[in-house]
Image: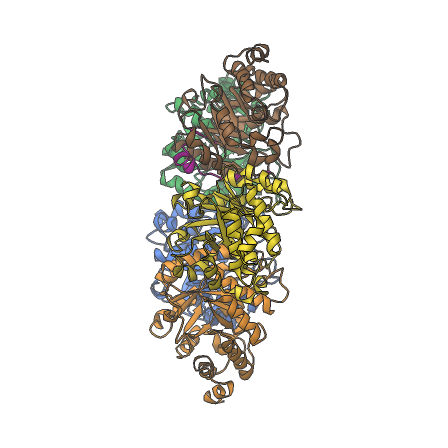
Chain colours: A green, B brown, C yellow, D orange, E blue
Amino acid sequence: MQPFNDSPLARDGKVLILAYDHGLEHGPVDFEDVPESADPERVFDVATHPAVTSLAVQKGIAEAYYPSYEDDVNLLAKLNGTSNLWMGEPDSAVNCSVEYAANELNADAVGFTLYGGSNHEIEMAEEFRDAQEAAREHDLPVVMWSYPRGQGLKNDTKPGTIAYAARQALELGADVAKVKYPGSQEAMEQAVRMAGPTKVVMSGGSKTSDRDFLETVKAAIDAGGVGLAVGRNVFQRENPRHILDALEKVIFEETTVDTALEAAGE
Amino acid sequence: MQPFNDSPLARDGKVLILAYDHGLEHGPVDFEDVPESADPERVFDVATHPAVTSLAVQKGIAEAYYPSYEDDVNLLAKLNGTSNLWMGEPDSAVNCSVEYAANELNADAVGFTLYGGSNHEIEMAEEFRDAQEAAREHDLPVVMWSYPRGQGLKNDTKPGTIAYAARQALELGADVAKVKYPGSQEAMEQAVRMAGPTKVVMSGGSKTSDRDFLETVKAAIDAGGVGLAVGRNVFQRENPRHILDALEKVIFEETTVDTALEAAGE
Amino acid sequence: MQPFNDSPLARDGKVLILAYDHGLEHGPVDFEDVPESADPERVFDVATHPAVTSLAVQKGIAEAYYPSYEDDVNLLAKLNGTSNLWMGEPDSAVNCSVEYAANELNADAVGFTLYGGSNHEIEMAEEFRDAQEAAREHDLPVVMWSYPRGQGLKNDTKPGTIAYAARQALELGADVAKVKYPGSQEAMEQAVRMAGPTKVVMSGGSKTSDRDFLETVKAAIDAGGVGLAVGRNVFQRENPRHILDALEKVIFEETTVDTALEAAGE
Amino acid sequence: MQPFNDSPLARDGKVLILAYDHGLEHGPVDFEDVPESADPERVFDVATHPAVTSLAVQKGIAEAYYPSYEDDVNLLAKLNGTSNLWMGEPDSAVNCSVEYAANELNADAVGFTLYGGSNHEIEMAEEFRDAQEAAREHDLPVVMWSYPRGQGLKNDTKPGTIAYAARQALELGADVAKVKYPGSQEAMEQAVRMAGPTKVVMSGGSKTSDRDFLETVKAAIDAGGVGLAVGRNVFQRENPRHILDALEKVIFEETTVDTALEAAGE
Amino acid sequence: MQPFNDSPLARDGKVLILAYDHGLEHGPVDFEDVPESADPERVFDVATHPAVTSLAVQKGIAEAYYPSYEDDVNLLAKLNGTSNLWMGEPDSAVNCSVEYAANELNADAVGFTLYGGSNHEIEMAEEFRDAQEAAREHDLPVVMWSYPRGQGLKNDTKPGTIAYAARQALELGADVAKVKYPGSQEAMEQAVRMAGPTKVVMSGGSKTSDRDFLETVKAAIDAGGVGLAVGRNVFQRENPRHILDALEKVIFEETTVDTALEAAGE
């Protein structure tokens, strides 16, 4: 297990994952407002922005585009994921083996969703075990999308749930826990504390205004989170690089939101 | 991953898959109107038509007939499929391993059905993963029959569903997505856009008139699709070669439907 | 894949499988009328009759008796089968691996039941795939007991169902399809046509009179079937060799039923 | 497959299995009347009685005690078994692999329960297949606890059921079938006939009087059974050696029950 | 199988397992009263107390912290475990393979939960088999958390249930059974008797007063238990070392509770 700060996921100990698996998880509806966001090439270009420490995509996208971006982008291969065409108890198909991610995709890290509280939690945790142990063999850091969800969970962003999600990531051996923002900096601090040496990144969620979004990111960083995994709040913007400029300020330079917005020219 | 245009699936970047797995999927009822269509040899003969870039059949048919046609036909081994004797939630048995397709059947490509939205979607996606990764090892292109179907889906050809189906094929690593026609050229364009570098072919569907069928194919081509996978609209015709002549015009020479019908002597 | 006529299943292109797995499938009740029929040795002796081209038994029976009959009987190892102690949705346990059949039992061929239409059809088809591919490795012909059965099927011998059953055997890669008699020679012809190069044998069914039984066999042969798989209509007779004499006439010499009955001394 | 009479299970062609898996199957309640019967060492000592041809225990008991008794006791490793803490449809966990039984426990034979008629029959039969084939590799005889049980079975000791159970053991490849006593010598004869070359041993059942128990054993032997598998009727007695003395007479010397009781000093 | 007393689990034949998997099993709520107890480092430090013979944690915690404590702490890698985010029938995900525990975590022993009586008992027992046999290969002692639980069990600490739990551990091959305290010394004696050579440790349970807790531990030791597995009653105390001092007296020196409390300075 290599030190986190030396891993390809981090720059100066901070993380900005650009996540782009929405085409599988949500479908084309996520690309409607900004139609060109459906084009993976546009997103790979965005991922060359210096603020982005890695790009998270599914196998097929990686296979088709990553060969042209290996020098400029770090690949976080998302190993599982599922369409939302059905509405069953939360579960996620393992679409890519670690061996394939390592040897064929040339991934720098792997990502895996766990739906704690789902009826499929146990099966998913055992799939995570296989992935995590194989990732260690290939020296690939492991990011857990730790998302409690399912029949036993009414509100999946309440502080106790997010803290539990962060802890699950630690207990099961993830290097990074991607969790939803629990509503306050204090709650985020609790999640970070529960994760111990596992780094916590905030999940970006659905699109909001620049200021609201940056305020939340700032709170997550101030709470001890190492950064952000963001999708829609970047690629659903007409000019994704502006918000990345601002995020770079907030995450890597720990500026105020005002400074960040100014630097981004807004 | 070899470039699509160099793959045995394509000729001049276009695709015409003759699909003949109806004996398994639908049963003898599909052969009733043209009884000789039950004979695989007749269909292999039809597949030697220059417009046909590959023939999709199940293992047993390939095993029995392909040895005599290896020089004249490209084999697309359909790996999964199931009878319609029962009416349960959509699922498909994996009837042929990739290793068997590659080493024993001498297949040039493999095909795999995914029923997005079925209760079995996750299991099928994981079977697809195994097949796709094994196909890469054997340098066989992968065609996904991407057919959203199941309890959560009332109308499986609405534009959003077909666009999602095409995207699933891209995200999961298929080289070609076989999707149903979504009803309009505009909707087909959206599916093609969502598939990005994954090539889209229209699924032929049940038998219609020559003109109606060709108009639809023409619209799919104009929408950016690379071609067609067709079964009943060829083999349920008394003279399958006529419609193939016409399809050759529409798909490979991008003529009008009128020109195509004329060339086919009708 | 060796030519069928050279396979140990056939003599002069015809087939007479003596099936004796009733002890597992039906239990001792099938031996009540002729108590000595419970003794496998008696059935192995009967199987030395020249009309019998192979004997189909489960692993345990083969293990115990076949070593003494290897020179005189061809062994068709039935790989799956289940008791009727319960009445659930049709399914069948795989009781013998192909490797064991080939290496330990010295089987000449393997048999496998598929219940098309059962809720377990997909699982059974995938087990069949493994068995079929392993059988090819060991150069063992494959006989499919293709028996549509289950919740979606009310009458499993109607012509369309039997034709579908025969076609499934072809599509999935069986060399021989064992199907129930569909009620008429015409319907059997349709099943034979659907099976293409896969040979069709009629399943003997429950015991009837000599003449009725032979008339049905004759119709199956005239319909293009290559023969018969028979159990109760042989071993439930006091003198099984008489009916085998008659079957030899009808199947291998294609005589009339009258000639066959006469030759058999009745 | 070694001849049964040369196998470690038999002495002079007869069998007396001392079964001691009650701690798992029934729990401590079976040891209540004779508390020292909870101590496996006491039972291993009893198993050194010359009448006992093998001792059947679960993995953990074998691991702890058998090293001290290898010279004096033949070990029949029971491979599956389950607590009765729950009341679900009959099933049994495979607690020990054949490889472990052979290489680590130094077992002389293996035992396996099949609940014919249970909803889990098919799964259990397939686990039995793996165990049986592995046992053949290690040259270990296989005893099947053939116990029809489950939702479709109201009375699991009626003659037809026991006969079926015995036949299942033969068909699936067991060397010995352990069945419940079907109520009469005639019914036991039928079970023995159905098992053919598979040897039949009577299952001892719950504790009864010496005479009643011996009468039943005598009837089983007279019916052609090769012996007995007994647990509670031995270890729940204050002096297990007395009943073993008597059993030795009845089973190995085929004496009358009176003679046996006299010899045992009662 | 190495003798228990020579195993890293024991000191002078006694055992004190500090268990710290509550972050996974119960979540952050268990750390609320003593917030610093959420920090694994604090618990590893506590585990260096001479009374602690091993520390039981999940994979992720071991991976992150054990490298710094290998010289001072014996690691008991807990192989399975699950969050309580859902309320389904008891089950537990296998989060760590034995190979990983042995080769990557450098574990000294492994732990495994079995929920006897759960609908998942059979699946868990078979996972235990794999773990136990692999642990033997790596010469790692096996501790079973033997916790009857599930739909058939209303009160899981009644004497008969705990005695059964202890017996299951023996029958299935565990070296140590961790069971809940059955309410009295007499009941604990029964559990110890049922476990035979498998050592029994009492499970600490939820936090109580020092005296109450020590009285229970004392009773367990007097009953023949070899010690204790304790979590909350240590780490939920402000000064965990005081209670460990007292436990050292009661367990290893078998003092009275009064002496122990005095020695611990209370």
Look at the image and tell me in which quarter the C terminus of chain C lies.
Answer: bottom right
- Does any portion of residue B40 appear in the rendered image? yes
Query: Residue C43, position in %: x, y?
Result: 49, 61
**B31 is higher (above) or lower (below) than E257:** above
Instruction: Indicate yes or no whether the magenta region holds residue B99.
Output: yes
A100 in magenta: no
Which residue is nearer to you in this view: C87 or A59?
C87
Residue B129 x/y as whole percent:
47, 36
Question: Above or below — where is A93 with respect to C150?
Answer: above
Q: Is residue A171 visible?
A: no
- Looking at the figure, which quarter contains the N terminus of chain C? top left
Give residue E65's position: percent from left, percent from top.
39, 46
Q: What is the x, y in percent for residue C163?
A: 59, 40
Q: How many marks?
A: 0
Quarter of the image where one finds residue A13 = top left
Q: Magenta segment range?
A: B89-110
Residue E192 or residue E237, whichever sits in front? E192
Q: Quadrant of residue A47?
A: top left
